Amino acid sequence: MNLFAKPQSRLIKGCKANERPAQEGLYKLFYAEMLRICYRYLKSDQLANEALNIGFLKVFQNITLYEEQKGELGAWIRTIMVRTCIDMVRQETRFNDLKTELEDIDDVFVSPAILNKLYADDLLKQIRLLPHATQLVFNLSVLDGYTHKEIGEQLHISESTSRWHLSEAKKQLRTLLSPPNKSINSPTENIKKPK
């Protein structure tokens, strides 16, 4: 039994009736989770906050279309937020349909040991350093589980372009996350030998 079902039902009914307290309650309930999603997709905090507000505006404008029996409210709101972020990235970046053959794409392995060393915030900062298109494809594929076909349909790019961006993201992240190679001298190398 979902303990949040009853309060969410009341919030949904209130939002459908355009009641401000219900809208405020819904916003507060999903604020943190949806802001994290926006941070994942957009390069700046300002854009993430803008996407969050635009996304919630869309939620409130379309809440009458939401049907509780068809799916969980959080998933419905999350879909709106992801699509809002994609729209904002499209405005910020233009995708070039790269003609890449599948054989030319190297699948790059990022060591789990490297990923385990980083906290989520540190990893997010590294992901945000990727080019817009590459970051967007990485998030959709790795973090949200979309297929290359679905990514291509949403972003209006080919599947091979989606694969290229994912491969490029993995390469760049591996470089960003790899510790620098430092040659360590043995302690005796620095001791001067008598003549």
Image (spheres, rainbow, N blue to C red):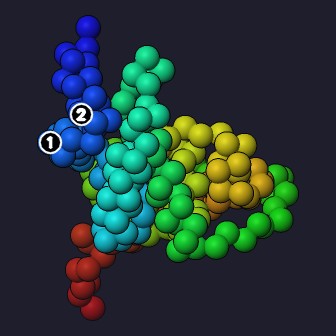
Residue 111 visible here: no
| Image-based side of 99 in relation to 186, left or right | right
- Residue at 58% from the left image edge and 55% from the top image edge: 137
Dot 1: what SS?
A: helix
Q: Position of residue 118 (x, y in %)?
A: 30, 52
Query: In front here: 27 or 98?
Result: 27
Residue 138, compared with residue 100, is above or below; it is: above
In this rendering, the count of numbered labels is 2
- Number of other residues with Cα within 10 Å of mark 1, as a class: few under 14, some 14 to 19, many 20 or more: few
- Number of other residues with Cα within 10 Å of mark 2, as a class: few under 14, some 14 to 19, many 20 or more: some
Q: Position of residue 156 (x, y in %)?
A: 71, 57
Q: Residue 137 — which label? A: none
- Residue at 81% from the left image edge and 62% from the top image edge: 100
Q: Earlier in the sequence, mark 2 or mark 1?
A: 2
Dot 2: what SS?
A: helix
Query: In front here: 114 or 125?
Result: 125
Q: CA distance from mark 2 to mark 1?
A: 8 Å
Residue 152, compared with residue 96, is above or below; it is: above
Residue marked by disc 2: 14
Q: Position of residue 85 (x, y in %)?
A: 47, 58
| Image-based side of 133 in relation to 53, left or right | right
| Image-based side of 132 in relation to 7, left or right | right
Seen from this angle, which residue lies furthest left? 21
Tag 1: amino acid: Pro
- Residue at 34% from the left image edge and 51% from the top image edge: 56
Tag 2: amino acid: Gly
- Residue at 21% from the left image edge and 25% from the top image edge: 10
Q: Residue 21 — which label? A: 1
* Contact check, label 2 and label 1, Cβ < 8 Å: yes
